[in-house]
Image (cartoon, rainbow, N blue to C red):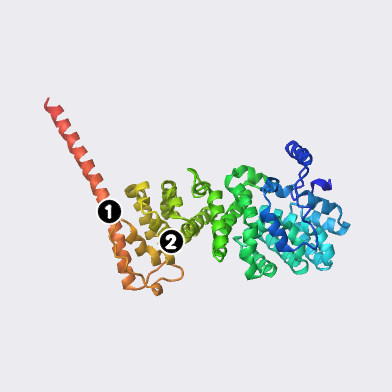
């Protein structure tokens, strides 16, 4: 195997890759060789990377497979480490698991100087595993290896922090709880709480460049990097990667709020990334039914964060498209979407975008979906439904409901299927009756139309017979 093209998928370079490589050599190369020093301070490097305006440092999804510095480190490794890293390139999950366990024990026996010499390649492998692997156990073990590096040689990660942080943020918002726990533990070990905001201020640009590629790159081209998987597995990995990226963007708003300068810069970066000041935004695309529930739920969470942290006028500019996706999601038979919708997203969106009702078909589409959602207890998400349902109805201009009416929390069971108290059942039944009356009115109108048409037809037949 040619060590120059070492990678998880073990693919030989295509013609396009060779052309890119020659062009890269003509330009003088891209990378961080000047910053790769065992004595470099972590925050000193971050400051240099933040103030740098060199366009050649632009980060993309595919650039993690073209880390020349990491490949040079691989060539200089001892044979034992090379064998371990080769196991991580196999397709079999068990082989990767054994390789990560062996790598963890091997790193624990190395000195800090030896670890700094291979830190770049460890970050290279970590980013590929987080971005392309389906098995959550492998992703958890990869974060365990990262924890060993943080504990043994924290400073050696300074020269690779712009490549590490985007995937670290993704791992901390992974759908698997065990992956999140290990990633958060290593993150808190590496950066104290009083320094985490500064790290975000100096690294959010690299993270936005990665998320920007997921937002604008077609799904098929991203899934090509996942290797030889089945189409179903590729869809699952794509859902995880995109949803964890969107969740990370929304979750980091809370960290950015601790510093005024960071909050402004972070909000401006999100607005630019999502193109909220332009006519078309990629955010609305992820709310459509073409994408899986994890991506759509993460997009709903991001909308809530945007409504809470940026100007409402930017969201109102995209109100027409967002209203249809958000309000029609009420009828989705999916627990993840319903939990996100009824917990916060629906109320926040309706309160901010007061004219959202003008952009949907209220009678034919929305009321039917709302009625089915109520009848089926939000498809399993009954606790947030019964907690916020009356408040939501009070915001609807076509239903006059007292917003002071509340449902007792003790009345809703944990499973969310039954409502025990008579007070709760009366309030819910009243809401059901109001929705039922609107539907009955529709049926009566249809029946009247049918009756009139039948009468007209009978009269016409009688006239023909008389003639």
Any mark on residue 342, and which? 2
Q: Nearer the viewer, residue 180 or 332?
A: 180
Residue at 17% over, 31% down? 461
Q: Quadrant of the C terminus?
A: top left
User: Which residue extends farthest left?
Assistant: 466
In 3D space, how far apart are the residues under numbered discs 2 and 1 (Cα atoms)?
23 Å
Residue 408, position as x, y percentages in the image = 37, 73
Q: Decide: is 255 above or below 458.
A: below
Residue 345, position as x, y percentages in the image = 45, 59
Q: Nearer the viewer, residue 245 or 235?
A: 245
Residue at 56% over, 62% down? 256
| Residue that numbered label 1 is attached to | 438
Q: Quadrant of residue 426?
A: bottom left
Mark 2 or mark 1: whose residue is earlier in sequence: 2
Q: Is residue 86 left or right of residue 284?
A: right
Residue at 43% over, 48% down? 317
**SS class of the residue under badge 1?**
helix
């Amino acid at each position: 195997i040619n060590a120059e093209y070492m990678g998880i998928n073990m693919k030989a370079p295509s013609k396009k890759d060779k052309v890119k490589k020659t062009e890269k050599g003509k330009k003088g190369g891209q990378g961080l060789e000047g910053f790769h020093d065992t004595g470099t301070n972590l925050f000193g490097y971050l400051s240099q990377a933040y103030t740098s305006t060199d366009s050649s440092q632009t980060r993309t999804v595919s650039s993690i497979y073209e880390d020349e510095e990491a490949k040079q480190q691989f060539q200089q490794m001892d044979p034992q480490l090379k064998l371990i890293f080769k196991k991580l390139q196999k397709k079999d999950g068990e082989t990767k698991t054994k390789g990560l366990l062996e790598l963890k024990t091997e790193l624990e026996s190395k000195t800090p100087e030896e670890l700094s010499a291979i830190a770049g390649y460890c970050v290279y492998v970590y980013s590929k595993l987080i971005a392309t692997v389906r098995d959550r156990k492998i992703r958890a073990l990869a974060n365990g290896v990262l924890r060993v590096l943080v504990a043994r040689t924290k400073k050696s990660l300074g020269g690779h922090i712009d490549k590490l942080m985007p995937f670290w943020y993704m791992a901390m918002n992974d759908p698997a709880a065990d992956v999140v726990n290990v990633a958060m533990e290593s993150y808190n070990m590496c950066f104290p709480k009083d320094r985490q905001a500064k790290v975000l201020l100096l690294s959010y640009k690299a993270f936005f460049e990665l998320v920007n590629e997921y937002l604008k790159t077609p799904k098929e081209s991203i899934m090509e990097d996942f290797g030889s998987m089945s189409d179903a597995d590729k869809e699952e990995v794509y859902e995880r990667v995109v949803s964890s990226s969107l969740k990370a963007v929304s979750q980091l708003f809370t960290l950015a709020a601790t510093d005024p300068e960071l909050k402004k810069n972070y909000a401006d970066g999100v607005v630019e990334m999502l193109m909220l000041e332009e006519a078309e935004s990629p955010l609305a695309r992820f709310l459509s039914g073409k994408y899986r529930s994890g991506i759509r739920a993460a997009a709903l969470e991001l909308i809530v964060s945007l409504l809470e942290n940026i100007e409402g006028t930017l969201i109102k500019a995209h109100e027409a498209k967002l209203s249809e996706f958000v309000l029609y999601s009420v009828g989705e038979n999916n627990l993840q979407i319903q939990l996100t919708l009824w917990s916060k997203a629906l109320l926040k969106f309706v309160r901010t975008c007061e004219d959202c009702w003008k952009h949907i078909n209220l009678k034919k589409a929305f009321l039917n979906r709302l009625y089915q959602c109520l009848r089926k207890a939000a498809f399993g998400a009954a606790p947030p439904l019964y907690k916020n349902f009356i408040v939501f109805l009070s915001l609807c201009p076509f239903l006059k409901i007292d917003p002071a009416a509340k449902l007792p929390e003790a009345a809703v069971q944990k499973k969310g299927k039954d409502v025990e108290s008579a007070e709760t059942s009366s309030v819910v039944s009243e809401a059901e009756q109001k929705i039922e009356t609107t539907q009955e009115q529709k049926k009566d109108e249809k029946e009247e139309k049918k009756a009139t048409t039948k009468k007209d037809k009978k009269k016409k037949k009688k006239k023909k017979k008389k003639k």
